[in-house]
């Protein structure tokens, strides 16, 4: 995507994003409404700029930017920023917005400084099934990112309540019940999207590739990930996994997700990156 966006403009966008996060911190520590409003508008500026880059790329290449790890990280960061704006507008949840933006900033900087040397899926192999497979997978990862954020918030709130040190700074945390509901919802959405992605990916591989091994690292890792989240959700619904243990399991599972996201390419026999 080097020809789509200049390095200078994208680095400027990263700086703007960093300033917005600083303003969110200022608002959290000192309750400065102007800082929060300015932070939101700066994040909105970053989202608009990223969306323009995305639209320009689609216009020039006639495809969606998800066919390499470099492109996928960009799309993933864009999704996280989109979710943070949606949470700000509809959920009115300050700290979840802040943590989602932290994740978005991390992946945005990874995209900025990562060399654009990843292979792109061969044009002859690209199909609508493949694009939907990859797209649904990345959106599923974004949904699991939300469950990770709310799991962190659950543990923070639980610790504050247990130690009875509930200051005005923590009033912006959602309740334990609300946090748990968000974990449930985002996990369920992620499981459904990842399941669709795996089904379409398996069909595409069987119909397109000559030699496909079910023991491929990426295949095994993705199915294990879907199974892990399904078991976690089922165990919680049956009362076997609750409270902070439930939150910690989500954190550990998200770490496995990140590992699968980045290492799947190097250890896979046929995945170009995803």
Image (cartoon, rainbow, N blue to C red):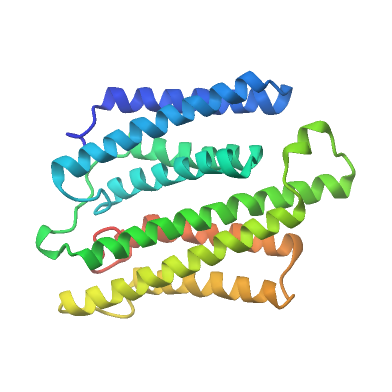
Figure quadrant of the C terminus:
bottom left
What is the x, y in percent for residue 98? 59, 37
Q: Residue at horizontal 64%, vertical 40%? A: 92
Figure quadrant of the N terminus:
top left
Please give left or right for residue 204 compared with residue 225 in the image.
left
What is the x, y in percent for residue 25? 63, 27
**Residue 6 falls in image quadrant:** top left
Q: Residue at horizontal 25%, vertical 48%? A: 65
Which sits in the foreground, 122 or 32? Answer: 32
**Residue 202 falls in image quadrant:** bottom left
- Relative height, residue 149 to residue 263 (above, below): above
Q: Residue at horizontal 45%, vertical 57%? A: 141
What is the x, y in percent for residue 31? 72, 24
Which sits in the foreground, 82 or 247? Answer: 82
Q: Is residue 177 visible?
A: yes
Please give left or right for residue 185 compared with residue 217 in the image.
right
What is the x, y in percent for residue 255? 53, 57
- Relative height, residue 57 to residue 17 (above, below): below
């Amino acid at each position: 995507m080097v020809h789509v966006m200049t390095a200078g403009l994208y680095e400027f966008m990263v700086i703007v994003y960093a300033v917005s996060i600083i303003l969110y911190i200022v608002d959290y520590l000192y309750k400065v409404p102007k800082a929060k409003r300015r932070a939101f508008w700066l994040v909105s500026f970053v989202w608009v700029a990223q969306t323009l880059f995305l639209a320009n790329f689609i216009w020039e290449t006639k495809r969606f930017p998800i066919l390499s790890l470099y492109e996928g990280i960009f799309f993933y960061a864009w999704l996280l920023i989109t979710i943070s704006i949606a949470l700000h507008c509809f959920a009115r949840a300050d700290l979840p917005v802040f943590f989602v933006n932290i994740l978005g900033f991390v992946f945005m900087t990874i995209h900025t400084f990562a060399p654009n040397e990843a292979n792109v899926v061969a044009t002859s192999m690209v199909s609508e099934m493949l694009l939907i497979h990859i797209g649904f997978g990345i959106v599923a990862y974004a949904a699991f990112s939300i469950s990770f954020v709310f799991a962190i918030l659950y543990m923070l709130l639980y610790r504050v309540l247990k130690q009875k040190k509930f200051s005005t700074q923590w009033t912006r945390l959602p309740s334990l019940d609300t946090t748990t509901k968000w974990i449930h919802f985002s996990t369920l959405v992620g499981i459904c999207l990842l399941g669709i992605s795996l089904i379409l990916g398996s069909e595409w591989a069987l119909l397109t590739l000559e030699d496909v091994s079910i023991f491929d690292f990426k295949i095994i890792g993705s199915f294990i990930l879907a199974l892990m989240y399904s078991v976690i959700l089922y165990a919680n619904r049956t009362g076997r996994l609750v409270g902070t243990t439930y939150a910690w399991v989500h954190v550990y599972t998200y770490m496995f997700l990140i590992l699968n996201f980045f290492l799947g390419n190097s250890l896979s026999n046929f995945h170009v990156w995803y």
